[in-house]
Image: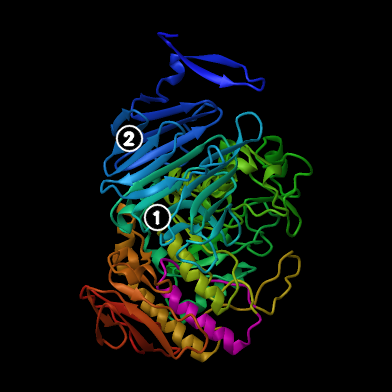
Amino acid sequence: MILSNKKMIIIPVLAGILFTLNISAQDTESRFSTDKNSLIWENEGELFRIEAFGDNTLRFRSSRSLHITEENWNILDQPEVIPEIKIMPGKAVIINGTIRAEIRERDGLITYLNNKDEILLKEAFHHHVPRFARQYDSKGSDHFEIILTFVAEKDEHIYGMGQYPNDCLNLKGTVLELAQKNTQISIPFFISSKGYGFIWNNPSIGRADFSLTHTSFTAKYARQIDYFIFQEDTPAGLVRKYSDMTGKAPEMPEYGAGFWQSKLRYYSQEDLMKVAREYKKRNLPVSVIVADFFHWPETGDWKFDPEYWPDPKGMVEELEAMGIKLLVSVWPTVNMNSENYQTLRKNNYLIRPENGVNTFLPFAGYLTYIDPFHPGAREFLWSKLKQNYYDIGIRMFWLDESEPEMEPLDYENVRYYRGNGLEVSSLYPYYLSKAIYEGQVNEGQEEIINLTRSGWIGIQRFGTVLWSGDIYGDFETLRRQVKAGLNISLCGIPWWNSDIGGFFDSGLSKKDFNEVLIRWFQYGTFCPVMRLHGQRKPYTKIEGSPMHTGAPNEVWSYGEEAYGIMSRYLRIREKLKPYILENMKKASADGTPMMRPLFYDFPDDKQCWEVEDQYMFGPDLLVAPILEAGAKTRSIYLPDGPEWVDALSGKKYKGGKTIDYKVSIDNIPVFTRNNSDFRIDQN
């Protein structure tokens, strides 16, 4: 029997009877099609689109809903590029510059390659699990729990992904929660030692698994799989490409590169001013001083308590005359007793529970949060900050609790203006920072720098300084900061710091803590932002206030030896400011981070991919922090190529080897190259 437009399939049935099933010719037609700059694949139950997105970049989106949304989240539009698309029997290819994707027709399996035909990333295949690479578990309507899985190589190195206190620079072998928490900042972008960058373009709560054999991403509640993959020959090229796609930080103002003084907490105007005046009396450089939380009458009032801060305008003016900027803490939390609560509530400017009572954080009362996803809420928040802070001369804001921090942390029980908490929670710090930044821009402010505890893709565009959260003051924690700071620096964040000395007390003796503090202070001198902070014991109860104040935390608070060393490093920081500002301009121009792992500058030196406790501070300075108690020597690897000069002694070393370097409590090992004239003064 011959059919002109039919295909006959003979199928056996249980009774041994044969019957024929006729399939239309269109069912055997190609699953591929094209649209503008995209290659489309469709089969029963799934649709995906791969498109060119700027140079050397491909974007992939897929869904079982058969609808691809155009939501870019925070990725910036790129110049239009027309890719080369080939549809052949059994497969299709889309090529954009140095990257291409090959798609197998029968199941849509994708392999990404560079222009040398080397595999960059390949979707995983399982003989007994259909569509193993892209799994969708329906959560109702057009939402799914999604798992995307690629094959991985054991020797691949993975870096980036934001800030995780897991003591790992190379993230291979780690499992990362994709969620914002105190000390954890999820920025789902990584670079691979194989020469590609990858953005998981999804703010859903989820997980990233970098196992020895597989790389996978999970989104708990999302409409589609959405990611970008791009190819460049160097880590620097990958980071610059990511910055082109997500935006760059504005230029750092001169005062941002100086020393920031803080503690938990200066409880009054006079308490803070005594410290500022003492710094000036001692002729110690200080650029910023911080008024921490509970300077307000009620949480959510966003203003100074006149009982303790009677003349904030006069305070700001006196500080400005000293050359000191005031940074004020403004939490996004709101107490029901706040003067703003009812207005926020009735206008739906607060986040809400899907079920239960509208309180999310029991801290000196029961607090809820403003909802920065709501444009009206952003405008209202800025109006209060302008009225009570900006109009008296304050230009810097500290956005603490910006994850937001909740107890219990039930994402599925949070309703934002933008959607359910499982779907969009990771974006909260981005929109909170956006609210403040846009307010400052609208007022004509040109130099913008604000401190925040969390972030996401693109937050650098808002002049944000990220810090590593509420951490402990010990050597183990200090070691983790070095690696966390380097990974987040690869994610478009040029402005980062940690609480020098740690935030929480670790129960160390005074002598042992002083050693940690000194080593941390030396490390902080060679961080993009240098900020001393922490709650030191013993605490003092403040009458009429719900919050205590900690013990003194100024450089003269820890004895003469510590004071001598720290004041010396304040002078070193001042000497570094022109170098820091020069390199911060470069970060604003092309995304090059000030602080980066050794492999960033020396990708051809294999040993640099293994070193996790040293870093480059700009192109000329190699820094090797002391991360162990009682250290007398420090093993230091000097990358191959340049001649290295000890910034302390002036001794020269040939690169490409490891040296045992003698250390004392007075100094941090720093080496220079490129004929840098930087030297660490010995007194």
Q: What's under tag 1, amino acid-wise?
A: Ile
> Pointer 1 and pointer 2: residues touching (CB < 8 Å)?
no
Give me the C-alpha separation between circle 1 and circle 2. 22 Å
Q: Could you tell me which secondary element the residue under label 2 belongs to?
A: strand
Quick one: 470 or 297, which is closer to the camera? 470
Q: Residues within 10 Å of mark 1 (few under 14, many from 20)?
A: many
Q: Could you tell me which secondary element the residue under label 1 belongs to?
A: strand
Residue on which the image places disc 1? 191
Question: Residue 497's x, y, as percent?
Answer: 47, 66
Question: Residue 501's x, y, as percent?
Answer: 55, 76
Q: What's under tag 2, amino acid-wise?
A: Ile
Quick one: 261 or 459, which is closer to the camera? 459
Q: Quadrant of the C terminus?
A: bottom left
Question: Where does the magenta region start and end?
Answer: 507-536
Residue 184 visible to the viewer: yes
Residue on which the image places disc 2? 94
